Structures are given as structure tokens and as C-alpha cells.
């Protein structure tokens, strides 16, 4: 009889930011560790959390994920826990918590990516892997952070920075390797797509944005969603990852949906079309890459016109396969927490491969 020896790994993790996404990850940890142990070969143990509102806490033996999720902590509430403080001491937590891996899910700053860029840099310099859904550090400092990760023998992973848990970055880079991506266009913001759909149903703009906030789709400041700044970061991330560009956000033209009036929406419907916020990039003949974000009136039969709600889709224009479209959730708490899990799985598998090769 064949006996398979199971090697169980526990990853100690520190959560930076404890809003919708990292809370959802803690919720998954509270219920799914036994399944992950069985199917993935690892479990996750939360040894620290830091959040602007709640404060910070370090517990080397681990915090109970269920308690973290269910306890209704007040402002500074982590200060009452053993090892806790009412302040979000991110730098100390990131540098000193006994964590293998830092999960960065604070707010996306579309201007300079801070303080998340510093959070990622501190973690990588301390020899800790980073997984993040934060678009700021990836769009603005990916090259630097990848180099710091490499120099310190750790990983920097960010699948959730584009299309939430829908695997667009890894899918394009790994499964479509060699297909030669020449450009892409897509719906890359769940909130604005949801808002446009609700407006088509007759709801006013402000109420539709409120609904997207309640559902956990919107940015902390939803201006980023409706003015296209969020899509601009995602266009930069995809262009730099898939087209080998080195675009900066300010090099991508950007117009959002906030100026679309109810009559624009009605007129589009009367012409068998609908408005969509489209992000795109293309490699030009001379090798340069041009990116743009703007609302487009698409005929009903256009492949992106039927993408509704917080669903996103991106059509990759490839040399060898023609157009390949990837579609799936583009926002949502659990959906985005899944992206973090997928990053951790990628790190786990890479470590296992490295160990096998070293043996
Ligand atoms: N929600 C989604 O569908 C998706 C989100 N993302 C990205 O994931 C990240 C997290 O999103 P989400 O959880 O929805 O956002 P939330 O706004 O719900 O959570 C962010 C949390 O981080 C805290 N925070 C902000 N700044 C700091 C700081 N400097 N130090 C410590 N904590 C801080 C916030 O506290 P406070 O509220 O007090 O400011 C809040 O609790 C964002 O960058 C977002 O762009 C990516 C893909 C999809
Ligand atoms: N606010 C963003 C969240 C994911 O990046 C969106 O609505 O798409």
C-alpha cells in the first residue's frame, strides 16, 4: 500500500488594514483552514492585525479568526487585547510581528500609492512575503518592489489588484505565455459598471453609488471609481505586466462616468446600445504603449456590452489566438479575499518547487 506523507505548513500572517477584504479573509480562515490543510497543504494563522480605526495587535501564538470577525470592536478596540494598542502602528507590526507573510489591504491611494508602498517595502525588506489587493503599490512601484522581493528571497503577489478574484494576471502570464499579447480592452471597475446598470434601471447616480458602497464594491473614496482613476491604475498594471510597458498613471488619458446624465443613458438604450467605462492599452508599431480610460457607447452585440453588475471582463488581443476574453467578479469582499488566497497558494507552490529543486 502506498503511504503519502503529508507535510503540513502553517503560514503566520499579519493583516494590514481590517476593512471589507481582510475581514473576509479572516472569515475564510475561521471556517476553511481544515479544507485548506487537506486540499492545499497549508493553514493560515493570524499573528497580527493593524487598522487605522481599530488599532493594532500582535499575538505570536495566533489570534482567533472567528473572534476577530465577530467581535464588534469600537475605535481603538484592539488596545484592549493582550499585545494590543489603540494606534495602528503599521511599521512596528510589519517589521517585528512573527509573520511569514504580510497581507496589505489598506486603501488604494491613486496619487502616490502611499502608505501602502512603504508597507510593502518594509515587509519585503524584513524578509516577509507580501500579498496585496491594493492597486497603488502595484501600479506605481511594482518594478522597485519586485526587485526588493527578489533581493530578499521573498514573493510580491498582487492578483487581486485587477479584476478582484478573477485570475487575469496569472492567467495571461502563465496559461497564455507565448500567445503574445498586443493589447487589451475591458471593463475593469465593478462599481462604475454596477452604477451604469442601476442607472439604466432608472436609479439616480448618487443612490447607485451608495448601493455599491454597501455591497463592498466601492473604494474608500468612490470618486476613484466613477472618475476612472481606479481603472487607470488597472490599465497601468496590465500594460506593464502583459505588454512589457513602463507606464505611469499620469500617462494614461482618463475620463470617468460622472458626467453621463440619465438622458445620455436613455438615448443610448434607444439606439440599442449602452454606456460602459472601458480601459484599454495597445502596443504601437514603434513599440510604445498607449493606454486610455473613457466611457464608450457600445452596441448591444459588442462582447463587453452584456457584462453587467460588478462583473468585469477583459479581451486580450493576442498574436497567436486572436481575442481571448476573461470574465468574472471584478469587486466584492469574499471575491477579493479569494485573490489573496490564490496569491498565497502561488507562493506555497513556488516554495515547494524551490525545495524540491534544492533537494
Ligand atoms: N472591495 C473590493 O471589491 C476590492 C478592493 N480592492 C482593494 O483592496 C483594498 C482593501 O479594500 P476594502 O477592504 O474593500 O477597503 P476598506 O476601505 O473596506 O478597508 C480598508 C481598511 O484599511 C484601513 N486603513 C486605511 N488606511 C490605513 C493605514 N494607513 N493603516 C492601517 N489601516 C488603514 C481602513 O481604515 P479606515 O476605514 O479607518 O480608513 C479600513 O479599515 C483597497 O486597496 C481596495 O482598492 C481590490 C479589489 C477589489
Ligand atoms: N472599487 C473597485 C474594487 C476593485 O478593484 C471596483 O469597483 O472595481
Image: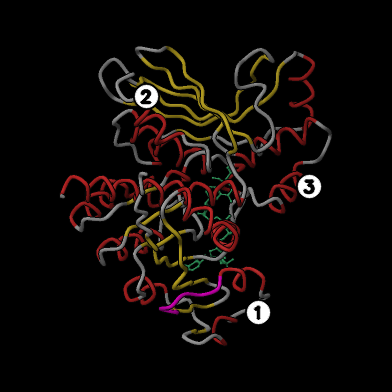
- Residue at image coords 53%, 83%: 86
The residue wearing badge 2 is 176
Q: Is 253 situated left or right of 245 in this image?
A: right
Q: Pinpoint residue 319: horizontal percent, then vertical percent.
A: 35, 13
For marks 3 and 2 on the same chain, the one whose residue lies earlier in the sequence: 2
Using the image, determine if residue 141 lies above or below residue 69: above
The N terminus - image quarter: top left
**Residue 74 marker:** 1
In the image, which is nearer the foreground, mark 2 or mark 1? 2
Q: Which mark, residue 12?
A: none
Q: Quadrant of ligand 2?
A: top right
How would you rate the neighbour count of disc 2 (Cα within 10 Å): few for under 14, some for 14-19, many for 20 or more? some
> In which quarter of the view is residue 331 placed?
top right
Tell me the residue at 35%/44% (across/down): 2
The answer to whether the residue labelled 3 contacts the one labelled 2, judged by CB atoms less than 8 Å apart, is: no
Real-space Cα separation, disc 2 to disc 1, in angstroms: 47 Å
Determine the image quadrant of residue 197. Answer: top right
Q: Position of residue 195 (x, y in %)?
A: 71, 39
Magenta stretch prevailing secondary structure = loop
Residue 290 image point, x, y percent: 37, 26
Question: SS at mark 3?
Answer: helix
Mark 3 — residue? 207
Asked if 292 appears above or below 148 in the picture, the reply is above
What segment is highlighted magenta in the picture? 59-64
Q: Which of marks 3 and 2 is in front?
A: 2
Residue 48 located left or right of residue 306? left
Task: Point out the tag, 2 or 1, that comes first from the N-terminus.
Answer: 1
Q: Distance of mark 3 from mark 1, alpha carbons?
A: 28 Å
Q: Earlier in the sequence, mark 3 or mark 1?
A: 1
201 left or right, relative to 226: right
Work out whether residue 232 or residue 351 is closer to the camera in this orientation and state it.
Answer: 351
Amino acid at each position: 500500500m502506498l503511504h503519502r506523507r503529508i507535510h503540513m505548513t502553517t503560514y503566520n500572517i499579519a493583516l494590514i488594514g481590517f476593512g471589507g477584504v481582510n475581514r473576509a479573509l479572516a472569515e475564510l480562515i475561521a471556517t476553511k483552514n481544515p479544507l485548506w490543510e487537506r486540499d492545499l497543504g497549508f493553514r493560515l494563522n493570524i499573528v497580527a492585525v493593524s487598522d487605522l480605526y481599530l488599532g493594532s495587535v500582535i499575538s505570536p501564538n495566533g489570534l482567533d479568526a472567528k473572534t476577530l470577525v465577530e467581535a464588534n470592536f469600537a475605535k481603538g478596540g484592539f488596545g484592549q487585547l493582550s499585545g494590543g494598542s489603540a494606534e495602528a502602528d503599521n511599521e512596528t507590526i510589519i517589521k517585528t510581528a512573527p509573520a511569514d507573510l504580510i497581507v496589505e489591504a489598506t486603501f488604494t491611494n491613486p496619487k502616490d500609492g502611499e502608505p501602502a508602498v512603504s508597507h510593502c517595502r518594509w515587509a519585503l525588506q524584513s524578509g516577509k512575503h507580501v500579498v496585496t489587493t491594493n492597486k497603488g503599490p502595484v501600479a506605481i512601484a511594482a518594478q522597485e518592489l519586485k526587485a526588493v522581493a527578489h533581493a530578499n528571497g521573498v514573493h510580491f503577489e498582487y492578483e487581486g489588484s485587477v479584476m478582484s478574484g478573477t485570475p487575469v494576471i496569472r492567467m495571461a502570464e502563465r496559461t497564455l505565455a507565448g500567445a503574445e499579447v498586443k493589447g487589451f480592452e475591458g471593463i475593469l471597475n465593478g462599481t462604475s459598471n454596477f452604477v451604469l446598470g442601476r442607472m439604466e434601471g432608472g436609479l439616480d447616480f448618487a443612490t447607485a453609488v451608495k448601493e455599491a458602497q454597501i455591497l463592498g464594491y466601492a473604494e474608500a473614496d468612490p470618486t476613484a471609481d466613477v472618475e476612472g482613476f481606479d481603472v487607470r491604475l488597472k490599465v497601468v498594471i496590465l500594460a506593464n505586466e502583459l505588454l512589457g510597458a513602463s507606464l505611469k498613471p499620469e500617462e494614461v488619458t482618463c475620463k470617468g462616468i460622472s458626467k453621463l446624465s440619465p438622458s445620455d443613458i436613455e438615448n443610448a438604450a434607444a439606439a440599442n446600445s449602452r454606456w460602459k467605462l472601458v480601459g484599454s492599452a495597445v502596443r504601437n508599431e514603434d513599440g510604445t504603449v498607449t493606454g486610455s480610460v473613457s466611457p464608450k457607447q457600445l452596441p448591444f452585440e459588442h462582447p463587453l456590452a452584456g457584462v453587467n453588475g460588478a462583473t468585469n471582463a477583459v479581451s486580450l488581443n493576442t498574436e497567436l489566438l486572436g481575442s481571448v476574453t476573461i470574465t468574472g467578479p471584478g469587486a466584492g469582499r469574499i471575491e477579493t479575499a479569494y485573490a489573496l488566497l490564490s496569491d498565497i497558494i502561488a507562493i506555497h507552490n513556488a516554495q515547494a518547487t524551490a525545495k524540491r529543486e534544492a533537494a
